[in-house]
Amino acid sequence: MPSTVTASLAALLTLTGCAGPLHSKLGAYTARTGSRVRFAGRDLRVTYVTPGTPRSREVLILFATGDAGYWGVSGQIAEHLAAQRYFLVTYDARQLVAREEIGHTCQDPGSRGLVRRCWWMPDGRWGSPDSVPVIVTGYSRGTNMVVLAAGIERLRHHLAGAIAIDSDPPRRLPRAGRHPPIRCRRCWSTSKAGSKRTRRSRPPDRSFALIQGTEDSHIGAEERISCSVQTRIAVVSTK
Amino acid sequence: MKAGHTFGGGARDTLMRDLDDAMEWVQTIATGN
């Protein structure tokens, strides 16, 4: 094999390695990615992150990536959650939700089973489904899992809450099909300068936060780095 | 933010801060404290 091809392959493998699941960080957390398992008709690889010094043993975080897997924002979010010393379960959302357009009556792509799977590590049980609630969170395509999981009645007592991170307008988020509608309870916007406006109707019985970029549905890269990016958080309830 | 888009500086800090706030809020609601 020519040396140039070998070098190119090495560079490619290095790049794809950077975009893969989290890797352990000495002294901070241990990340383990299990072998592929057949789940909801798809092959799925799940990464389990165990913090060296847990922030809390009373909650698990389930994070689903966006369209680019762990490349870019999703990787940064996963690393941030791990650095915050959460018990974290994460997977590449492309493994479960195909690229096709999600309609208003999309079906559950296995969210219920996926959440229930959180408590199982590749080599043993991690926690008890009845005692360790899950916060489901996802970015971009991963918000499909968040919204669907939040809308499943049978999962309610397993969930501590849900956080969807997206750059699209709320109408672009999928509805939970046959499941109860998710209605907004509280919205506020935050600017880079830290000013915050809050509008609240009544306390929610279950928390669902949406972190969303304002204005353009696809925020440009460089221009948004240099300017004041606003995010909007909508807190909605599943009741 | 486009697929695979990387961002840094203030944008990243803002998102991560909002994420931390949301995590805290969700857990506060869940525990009833």
Image: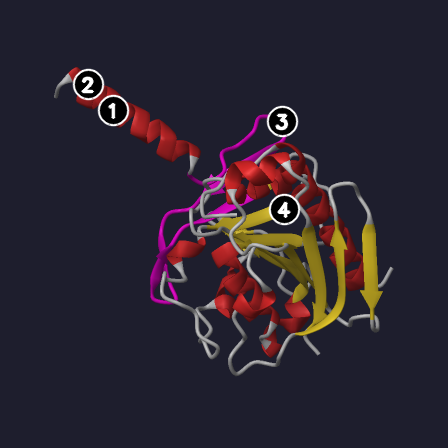
Kind of residue indicated by mark 2: Thr
* Chain name for mark 4: A
> Label 2 to label 3, Cα distance in Å?
37 Å
Mark 2 packing: few (<14 Cα in 10 Å), some, or many (20+)?
Answer: few
Give the labeled residue for mark 1: A8
Relative side of A160 to A110, left or right: right
Do labels 4 and 2 touch, CB within 8 Å? no
On the same chain: label 4 and label 1? yes
Magenta-tinted stretch = A20-49
Most distant residue in the left direction = A1
| Mark found first going from the N terminus, 3 or 1 | 1
Spatial separation of the CA atoms under disc 4 and disc 1: 36 Å
Give the residue drawn at x 36%, y 51%: A36
The residue that disc 4 covers is: A87
Query: Is residue B2 depicted above or below A179 in this figure?
Result: above
Q: Badge 3 is on which residue?
A: A27
